[in-house]
Image (tube, rainbow, N blue to C red):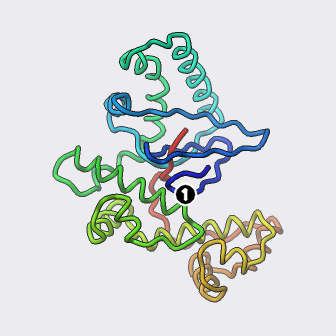
Amino acid sequence: MESAEGRFQLRRGDWIVLDRESCPLVQSDRRGVTLGLAIGGGLAAAAARLTETGLFAGRGGVDRDELRLFVRLWRGAERRLSDQVSLDGAGQLAALRPLLLFIGAMQREMAVHIARCPGRSHLRKRQVFSRLQRARLYIEGNCDRVVRIAELARLTSFSTWYFSRAFQSLYEESPQGASVRMRLERAALLLRTSGMLIGEIAAACGFDNCCSFARAFRSRFGTSASHYRRTALSGSPTHSAKPGGSNGKAPIVSGT
């Protein structure tokens, strides 16, 4: 999937929620099926009230049973909307209600962190959370390069100082730290699943040279990239990331 937030690879059971201006383009092979829902205008505001906390940019996953339930709810909503093409806003909301409640439930773990955002009112905290979620998704969608603080500040319409402070407060890691962590996690995935040379992986994950990549990878995973790959290919347990690199929050994702 390509969008204004970057590129994402979705697998079975993955969901992603994107901003209204994201303009996603989905590509799939003949064995893949992607189900989506576009909500705009007054219906988006009504959906936010229905789910109490609102729908936020981010991504995550569901298990097999939850995936089956989602498909069933999506088909039911599509059938109700197609049978009654002249539905007004209230009618559309009623048709989508079960599906929207399910999507809201998927994001419930994520939304509990709204209280950590700066702001005097709950509405302001929600607004800040929504913008920070999109920024974090943007970092994840651009794991092939270094994302600058100025880019993220423009994306959220915050000053660089306010953005950095709010991001650190919410995710307990700096934007720069999040970018390095996500790029190294992508590198680890490529080491496990691709035949790319280590130098090619370093370049594909936004590192200027193999030396800086090697230092960062060893610091993160406690072993060299070549040893990590050999261990993965042999079927032995690979090294886990060192504590403190991940914030333990629900993944930021967008869409369905």
Q: Position of residue 191 (x, y in %)?
A: 73, 70
- Compared across the picture, whether 170 is left or right of 72 comes to left
Q: Nearer the viewer, residue 127 or 122?
A: 127
The answer to whether 1 is drawn above or below residue 233 in the figure is above
Q: Residue at x 44, y 62 (%)?
A: 247
Q: Residue at x 33, y 69 (%)?
A: 164
Q: Nearer the viewer, residue 137 or 181?
A: 137
Q: Position of residue 122 (x, y in %)?
A: 22, 45
Residue 50 found in image quarter: top left
- Compared across the picture, whether 169 is left or right of 210 comes to left
According to the picture, the residue beneath numbered tag 1 turns out to be 6
- Compared across the picture, whether 91 is left or right of 7 comes to left
Q: Position of residue 151 (x, y in %)?
A: 41, 67
Q: Position of residue 95 (x, y in %)?
A: 46, 17
- Which amino acid, by three-letter code, is at mark 1? Gly
Residue 206 found in image quarter: bottom right
Q: Residue at x 59, y 33 (%)?
A: 66
- Compared across the picture, whether 182 is left or right of 31 comes to left
Looking at the figure, which quarter contains the C terminus?
A: top right
The answer to whether 174 is drawn above or below residue 40 in the figure is below
Q: Residue furthest left?
A: 120
Q: Residue furthest bottom?
A: 211
SS for callout 1: strand
